[in-house]
Amino acid sequence: MKWLMYLYPRNWRKRYGDEMNDLLEQKDWTFFLLIDLLRGIIDAWKIEINEREVFGIRMSNVLWLVGLINILIILQYRSLQEVILMEQVALIIAMISFFLAVSIFVVNLFKAGFQNAFSIKTKLSKMSVGFMGLYGVTFTVFLVLAN
Amino acid sequence: MKKKDRFSEPSLFILISLAEKDCHGYAIMEDIEKNYSIKLGAGTLYGAITRLEKAGYIQVLESDDRKKPYRLTDAGREYLSNQIQEIQAITTLGAKRLGLI
């Protein structure tokens, strides 16, 4: 279960990783501890995103903006009232994938630097490419179903 | 008016633990479990420690050991005193209204 530590932001791991690993070694693994760690990961990322800035704009605001754009796109397609359930599902998966791909890319841009963010050397850039691929596939499915 | 920092219950427990002596994470966790019968998970503990450290209420002490002890800062002591006074005022009001005092 120690691999869960790798889901924490890198800066957080550098600062608290050793201490937390040491503490976890002294505790038995329980379901409560697992849930608590997952909550801790979300919390740590929340702190990280609220502190980081992209071109002077707080990263949390950037993520809100990307999310809002996705919602507007979904609402636009919903208003047509022509798409059937499968199309909607494909579109929602596509938009979520796109959102995740962009979000992970932005996070990676700051974690790994400009050059590495455009390569597939890091785990995050691989994830970002994966989500972009999923976006491409599901969006193509949507277009096929819609036509 | 400056927005007042609000911290969760675990953060207050951590500050109270450190008010007595400098402690590392595991000792804080044990102290909380012993005194309040609350099992604090490692995720919650270090989430609260991160926030308190960023707020300047606690500071880490240099140590060669992997276990890093934490110390309550002057700002942390002042914040904890204010919080305890607030809690006291609330409990006094509650007790009065219930006719307990």
Image (spheres, grey):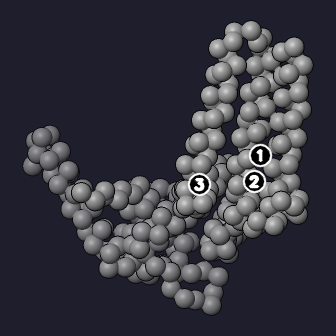
- Chain of the residue under the numbered disc 3 shown in the image: A
**B58 or B39: nearer the viewer:** B58
Q: Residue at x 69, y 9 (%)?
A: A81
Q: What's under tag 1, amino acid-wise? A: Ala
For the residues labelled 2 and 1, say whether their Cβ atoms are less than 8 Å apart. Answer: yes
At numbered mark 3, what does the secondary structure look like: helix, strand or loop? helix
- Distance between the alpha carbons at the discs numbered 3 and 1: 15 Å
Q: Is residue B29 visible?
A: no
Residue where numbered disc 2 is placed: A105
Q: Please give the label number shown on residue A59.
A: 3
- Mark 2: give few (<14), some (14-19) or many (20+) Cα within 10 Å: many
Residue A117 x %, y %: 80, 61
Give the residue type at disc 2: Phe
Q: Are marks 2 and 1 on the same chain?
A: yes
Give the structural element (helix, strand or loop) at label 1: helix
- State how far apart marks 2 and 3 are (Cα): 12 Å
Residue at numbered disc 1: A101
Q: Quadrant of the N terminus of chain B?
A: bottom left
Vertical side of A138 occupied by B58: above or below: below
Q: Secondary structure at mark 2?
A: helix
Q: Position of residue A13 (x, y in %)?
A: 67, 69
Q: Are marks 2 and 3 in contact (CB under 8 Å)?
A: no
- Viewer-closest of B82 and A141: A141
Percent position of residue B56, x then y: 41, 73
Q: What residue lies at 28% left-to-right and 59% top-to-bottom?
A: B2
**Separation of residues labelled 2 and 1 (CA atoms):** 6 Å
